Amino acid sequence: MALHAEAQRIAAEFEFTDTDVNSNVAEFIAQMKEGLEKNATTMSQIPTYVTAVPNGTEKGLYLAVDLGGTNFRVCSIDLKGESKFKLISSKVAIPKELMVAKTAKELFAFLAKQIELFLQEHHNDHFETHIRRRQTVSTPEGYRDEHIFNLGFTFSFPVHQIGINRGTLIRWTKGFDIPEAIGQDVCALLQKEIDLLRLPVKVAALVNDTVGTLMARSYTSPGKTGTLLGAIFGTGTNGAYVEKLSKITKPMEGDYDKTTGEMVVNTEWGSFDNGMKVLPNTIYDEQLDKDSVNPGIQMFEKRVSGMFLGEILRIILVSLLKSPTISLFGDDDSASNDWHSTSEIKKSSPLFTQWGVDSSILSDAELDNTEELGVLRQHISRVFGVISPSLEDAQAVKTIAHAIAKRSARLAAVALGAIVLETDRLAPVVSSHPGPKSTSDILDDVAKFKIADAASATANKLADTAGLTVNDDEIVDIGVDGSLVEHYPGFKDYIREGLRAIEGIGATGERKIRIGIAQDGSGVGAALIALVAAKMAKPTDYLGDLRRAAALAEDIKA
Ligand code: BGC
């Protein structure tokens, strides 16, 4: 019983009430605004130089690569128009030692090599003709753009962007740490290694994964409504949205098309509230931060994204294991263990290693709703190295894991809701067909149901019956991607519950927000941006710019 009570007590520390949601939204909006006005703010609000979202008619063959977390992906995307595409891709795990390599070259040479292998395997015809041409055609600056693949480089770290294919690294996140790369142009670093391998590839666009998600969702999403926001809830978390150019008042260096009056802004919301004015905090969050490679940074991300949730759980479980009054994984009397065994934790348990626990255990815990929690107990045995965990052990893990994930989803709602409000996308309430009650009566009824999930279904039904439908042009479309939002059961539902709690959104506004998975954002989205960039480039444009930047960087180093 002591374990049960302690698990409940800890879970309560992770409660993130409706009042908390609203105070966080207000602060989020304030920090968004600050980031649009000044440089070096807590939320970077990076202008991306992408000034329009696609409409599904775009066509062409492009390459895209994605460096952002655990894996490096290379793909080719054949955009067919009509919102359709064909994608071929390959993926390799990034060797851990390269994430913390001494030089940037080590990492970027590895990336270029993967592009070479991909081209050889999947586009050999194209590849060989280019290699032959490369040997016969030469200009002082290399071969011409029209003979090469345009590549969208999805690089999912905070970058100070100075053009569509130029950007210097601000800081590493998600466990990467190669200090030498900070301040360098990551496109030039990649182009240099591509050139050393003499590959027919131009780094045409630099893309954050959230921007790719936004573009991909806009290309594929149903209806004519352009997507407002692309968000990632995976290893890391972040969002990019379409902002009015007039609101971006801080200086922007590069050239861009001003005719649309808009630009996609990469918020880098992972660093929302690094000053900890409003974010929830527990001793477990504090310990995670203190022991991380970047203490005091990415404080929002450390409470929301997949890389950190398993670690928060691990820290809590270790603290319980140390408690003299609590018995976790230590049922030493077989009579009190319903599996008629005694439980024991192995000395080699991953629980005793920092980052030893993958966040997928949170999904496993949420998925098992049986009385005996048999499947979860098998996962606990396998993942934590515990022999015969008891039912009480599993219940404690489930209670705590649930609380950590639910707080994460409600924080996710803060970010999405704040952007919907800041961009003023919720037009005045829904349209209605005359029904037996007045519209405002019905809306009042709907509002009454705003708290619980089941109630929301009732509210939606009520609104539907009364003819309170949301028109296509009232929909606010959001594209999301990442392991957490894809695989954690109910993550989206908790986000929606959080959205309903936000003043200014409520049940009525939440019904207008469409959240859809936008897979392959880093592939399709990057290809779309490479397409835009290629269209912008002048026909006589050589790779010279990038090469000069790379040479300049070398000179500065020397
Ligand atoms: C990075 C972002 C990225 C996000 C999701 C964060 O750690 O700072 O640039 O978009 O992870 O991958």
Image (tube, rainbow, N blue to C red):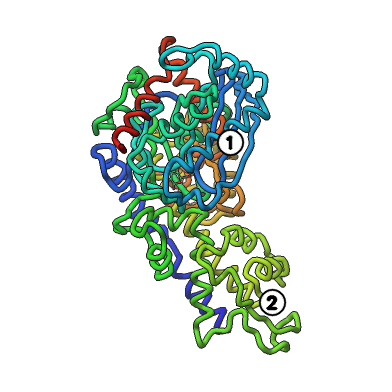
Rendered location of residue 527, percent (x, y): 53, 26
- Element under disc 2: strand
Instruction: Identify the mark at residue 381; answer none if there is no mark.
Output: none
Q: Badges 1 and 2: C-beta atoms under 8 Å apart?
A: no
Please name the residue shown 44% across and 44% down the image.
238
Please name the residue shown 50% across and 87% down the image.
324
Residue 245: image quadrant is top left
The correct choice, above or below, for 177 with respect to 77 in the image is below
Residue under numbered circle 2: 387
Quarter of the rendered image showing ligand 1: top left
Q: CA distance from mark 1 to mark 2?
A: 42 Å
Q: Which three-letter amino acid code belongs to the residue tagged 1? A: Gln
Nearer-the-camera pick, 344 or 196: 196
Dot 1 surroundings within 10 Å: few (below 14), some, or many (20 or more)?
some
Rendered location of residue 328, percent (x, y): 59, 80
Instruction: Identify the mark at residue 114; answer none if there is no mark.
Output: 1
Dot 2 surroundings within 10 Å: few (below 14), some, or many (20 or more)?
some
Q: Which three-letter amino acid code belongs to the residue tagged 2? A: Ile
Rendered location of residue 242, percent (x, y): 40, 31
Nearer-the-camera pick, 215 or 451: 215
- Element under disc 1: helix
Screen quadrant of the C terminus: top left
